[in-house]
Image (cartoon, helix red, strand yellow):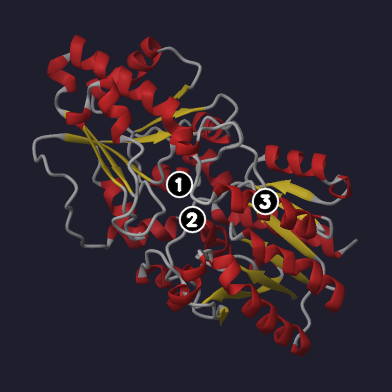
Amino acid sequence: MKKLLIISPHFPPINAADMHRVRQSVWYFEEFGWKPTVVCVDEGYVEGVQDPLLLQSLPKVLEIIKVKAFSTKWTRKIGLGALALRSLYFYLKEVNNILKKETFNLIYFSTTQFPVLILGSYWKWRFKIPYIIDMQDPWHSTYYLDKPKSERPPKYWFSYNLNKYLEPIAMKGCDGLISVSAAYITQLQERYSVLINKPNSVITFGAFEKDIEIAKGLKTKNDFFVNDSAKYIVYVGRGGFDMQPALTLIFSAFKKGLQEQPTIFKNFRFLFVGTSYAPKGKGAKTIEPIAEKEGILDYVSEHTDRVPYFEGLALLQKAYLLFIPGSDDPSYTASKLYPYILSKKPIMGIFHQNSSAKTILEETKSGAVCTLSDSVEMVYTIFSKQLESEAANTTDWDLFRNYSAEKMTEKQVELFNRVVSK
C-alpha cells in the first residue's frame, strides 16, 4: 500500500467547493492501493459555512491532521484574510514534522487556496517526495484584466501580482497535473515548458450518491419557497459577472414566455441561493440586477448567503426544474453538475459551447442544453418544452456510472502511479 499525503486546507465540516474532490475520493483510494492522510486547516480558523453533516460523508478510519492559521482578528488589520496565506507557516511547520517521522510516496495538493502550493517544491527538495497539483480553477488568471473595476474580485491587483510571482514556484517543480479542464493544463504548459512532458490528466469531479442519501434524510424548513402556489426553478451555487450572458438569455426567454404564454409562465419563479462567497450578509447581488434589466424582477429572487451543503442538496430535490447557468469562460466546468443530475429532477443548462458541462449533460441525456451562441428564440423554444409539461429526468444511468466518484478516483490513482514509477 502506497502512502498519499493530501493537502486540502478546506475539509469537513467546512462547506467549500474545492474540498469535494478529496472528500469523495478518500472512500476509494485504498481500493486502488493508496492509503490517504489529509492535512487540513482546523475549522476554528476558517471563515465560511460549516455543515456538520459533511462529517458523516467521511470514512471513519480516515487519518486527518489539522493545522492552525493566524486569526483574522489580527490579520484583517493589515488587510489579510486569505486562508492560504494565514495557514502557510503552520502547514510548513506541521508537514515538516510529519515527513520527518513518516515516509510518503506522493504529496497531492487539491485546493483553490493556491499559495499553499509553493510548499510542494520545498518538500520535494528537502524530503525527495514528488508532488502533483489538482487545478480546479485557474491560479494566475488574466480573465479579469480587460474587465471594468466593478466586475473584478476584491483586492484584484494584489492577488493578481501575488499569483504571478507564486505560480512559477509551484509549477516548475511539479511532477504531475490533474485538472477539471484541458484548457487549464494547456495554459500552464504554455507558460512552463517543463510541464509538457510531465504526466497530466483531465478529471472532472465525480458523482457521489452517498451525499444524496444523507440529504434525503434531512428534515429542514424551507424558507425560500415563499409563494406556495408557484413552481420553482432553482439554482444553488455561485453567481458572478461571467454568468451574465447565460442569465440574460434565460431571463429574455422567460420574458418572451410571459408575453406569449402567460398562463403557463406566470406560475413559475426563479430562485438563486448561495450566489456569493462573501461573509454572511455582505454579498453583492449579481443576478437580480440582470432580472431587473430584463423586466422580470418580480419572478426572480436571489439570496447571496451560502447555505450548508446538504441543505442545498435538499433544496434541489424540492424544485420543479433545476437551472444551471454556465460561465462565458470556455474552460469552466460546473462542479455542482453531478448533484443536480443525482437529484433526478429535470435540468435546463446554458453553457459555453466548449464547456465540459455541456458535453456531460448531452452524453448522459440528463437535461436540456443551450449554448451562449443560441438565439433567445431557440432558448425560449427549449425552455418552453421544459415548463409546458411535467418534464422528467431522462438520464442514462449506465452511461452516468462513468462519471462516478469511484471512477474519477481510479483515474487519479492512474496518474499517481505514473508519477511515482518515473
| Picture residue at 51% right of the left edge, 33% below the top | 148
Q: Which quarter shows the N terminus?
A: bottom right
Question: Which residue is under mark 3?
Answer: 161
Question: Which residue is under mark 1?
Answer: 336
Is residue 182 depicted above or below 379 in this figure?
A: below
Amino acid found under the numbered disc labelled 2: Ala
Q: Earlier in the sequence, mark 2 or mark 1?
A: 2
Cα gap from disc 2 to disc 1, whole angstroms: 9 Å
Q: Secondary structure at mark 1?
A: loop
Say which of 147 and 176 sits in front.
Answer: 147
Amino acid found under the numbered disc labelled 1: Lys
Say which of 308 and 116 sits in front.
Answer: 116
Q: Which mark is residue 101?
A: none
Q: Position of residue 169 (x, y in %)?
A: 79, 59
Question: Which residue is under mark 2?
Answer: 17
Cα gap from disc 3 to disc 1, whole angstroms: 30 Å
